[in-house]
Image (tube, rainbow, N blue to C red):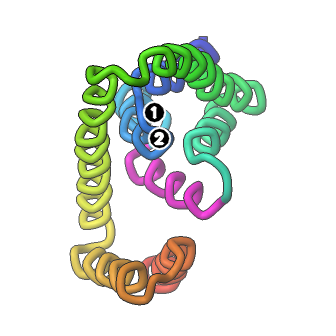
Amino acid sequence: MIYWELFLAFFIPNIVGYGGGPAIIPLIENEVVGRYGWMTSQQFAETLALGNTLPSPIATKMAGYIGYDVAGIGGSAVATFATVAPSLLLMLVALGTLYRYRDSIKVKSMSQWVRPVIMVLMAYLTWSFAAEGVDNAGWLHVAIIGAAATLLLWRFKLHPIWAVLLGLIYGGLLLG
């Protein structure tokens, strides 16, 4: 039964999600934390932070880790398959259809309306992680990390991996 639940927890977000890994993370969080209770919000946030430090798509890393955490190697395989297979199949069908009607105004309009939805999902994820951070570490630490990351990314054009690593070091030294 756990394999079926793992399959559904990663299959459904990947079927209804559009825009890649970052856009479906809130949907996966809803399944993993809210629906099945395999992790707390804090554990999910830590898993996401660690996953963002590693190369490759975030959704497959999250699926592999959470699947392994819940049901071992078999769970990892099921969750990863549930993440990859529907996206691949839907992508092939969608690309064939979009290519056929690529000059249609309706297809172009539909694509433009998806961006604001993804922006709202990412804003919600950011807000929920910030709220979780304030609850666990306090507003001062969240403000310091947020301001430092913003400064490093925008002003100094530092690669995001360095901002993430510095955040991990800060958390490990001052919050651990």
The residue that disc 2 covers is 39
Query: Seen in the image, is 161 located left or right of residue 144?
Result: right
Residue 56 image point, x, y percent:
66, 51
> Is disc 1 placed on a helix, strand or loop?
helix
Q: Secondary structure at mark 2?
A: loop
Which residue is depicted at the point 47% across and 51% down? 43
Residue receiving disc 1: 32
Please tell me whether residue 167 belongs to the stretch shown in magenta.
no
Pick whichever, 136 or 55, lies toward us.
55
Does the rendering let one see residue 5? no
Q: Position of residue 35 (x, y in %)?
A: 37, 25
Spatial separation of the CA atoms under disc 2 and disc 1: 6 Å
Q: Please state which amino acid type lies under the numbered disc 1.
A: Val
Label pair 2/1, CB-CB below 8 angstroms:
yes
Rendered image quadrant of residue 45: bottom left
Q: Residues within 10 Å of mark 1 (few under 14, many from 20)?
A: many
Compare residues 34 and 145 and report the one nearer the observer.
Answer: 145
Q: Residue furthest bottom?
A: 156
